Amino acid sequence: MSEEQKLYDAIVIGSGPAGLTASIYLGRANKKHLVIEGFEPGGQLTTTDVVENFPGFPEGITGPELMEKVKEQAAKFGAEFLMEEVTTLDLSSRPFKVEAGGETFLAKTLILAMGAEARYLGMESETRFKGKGVSACATCDGFFYRGKEVAVIGGGDTACEEALYLTNHASVIHLIHRRDELRASKIMADRVKSHPKIVIHWDRVVDEVLGDQTGMTGLRIKHPGTGETEQLDVYGMFVAIGHKPKTDILKGQLPLDEAGYLKLEGGPVHTGIPGVFAAGDVADRVFRQAVSAAGTGCMAGIAASRMVEAEEGE
């Protein structure tokens, strides 16, 4: 492949709702573009069992099915896809240089839509039992705990969604929250509080993940104020305490906030570098919804297309 063939009007990094929506708009504008999907195509939504709040699906739709439909739509408008991770990103000059899968690609414009990933507690015992009882995705792993007791860590919407999903499989779900009130939306909090399978442990944190060579066998939880501990005989722990934006590759090239989210400048999808746009959870620490990610993907796709067209007309 020649250098000329590797030059794209736009490269989209990420294949969640933001990245694929940007791709749809780039394709409709007849812009040659590449979507670098990463090794988890579809983003976080592919781990969501039922999506009830995306417009157009009154009966709900599974996350994987929704993302497959969006990808089909992007492909229909000419998107090229590469299932690789970006290893190097050079934003120092245009065209921007993107390395992935051992190749270098050039882009007149760039759309950053890498999304975010689940945060863990950071405990040694937690790391030891990842994949052997410790998970951050109930829809991925909940089936393995049919008829067993499990724990969910957190108190926001994600934790409540995980707990409610697990009621389809587990016998008892212990929701462990470090505060005395849930941070989730009222409708989600009410569902959790009223569900007969869910037991909420207020003002508690995980002190230790317990287990043996076969896997996790329990949790020791603690009251952070009194130091009082108790043991729960649970065989799975689902961590739902938030997400970390996938911005490590941007450090030193673009401004990030204290949590690692990309800072926007001069517009809703504009970064500090002309021609580099951001969409979705990589720059959204507030809403983090599929529909809001798709909305910013639309804006980024249009902004990139217009920039290319304006420069071609000079």
Image (spheres, helix red, strand yellow):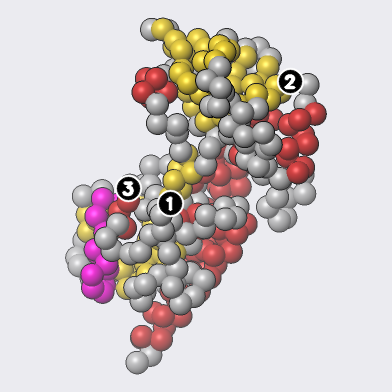
Q: Is residue 218 above or below residue 260?
A: above
Q: In the figure, is residue 59 to the left or right of 224?
A: right
Amino acid carrying label 2: it is Lys
7 drawn magenta: no
Name the residue nearer the viewer: 49 or 129. 129
Q: Amino acid at mark 3?
A: Glu
Counting residues from the start of the chain, the first of labels 2 and 3 encountered is 3
The label on residue 85 is: 3
Check disc 2: other Cα within 10 Å, few if <14, some if 14-19, many if 20+.
some
Residue 70, horizontal then vertical, whole percent: 56, 54
Among the 4 quarters of the image, the one containing residue 11: bottom left
Precedes in sequence: disc 1 or disc 2: 2
Residue 259 disc label: 1
- Farthest bottom residue in view: 314
The answer to which quarter of the image holds residue 46 is: top right
Residue 141 falls in which quadrant of the image? Answer: top right
**Quick one: quadrant of the N terminus?**
bottom left
Q: Amino acid at mark 1?
A: Ala
Q: Label 1, secondary structure: give it.
A: loop
**Residue carrying label 2:** 197
Q: Give the magenta part as a residue range.
A: 86-97
Q: Do the residues under discs 1 and 3 have CB atoms within 8 angstroms? A: no
Extreme front residue here? 226
Q: Position of residue 261 (x, y in %)?
A: 43, 56
Q: Secondary structure at mark 3?
A: loop
Seen from the viewer's position, the closer of residues 240 and 91 is 240
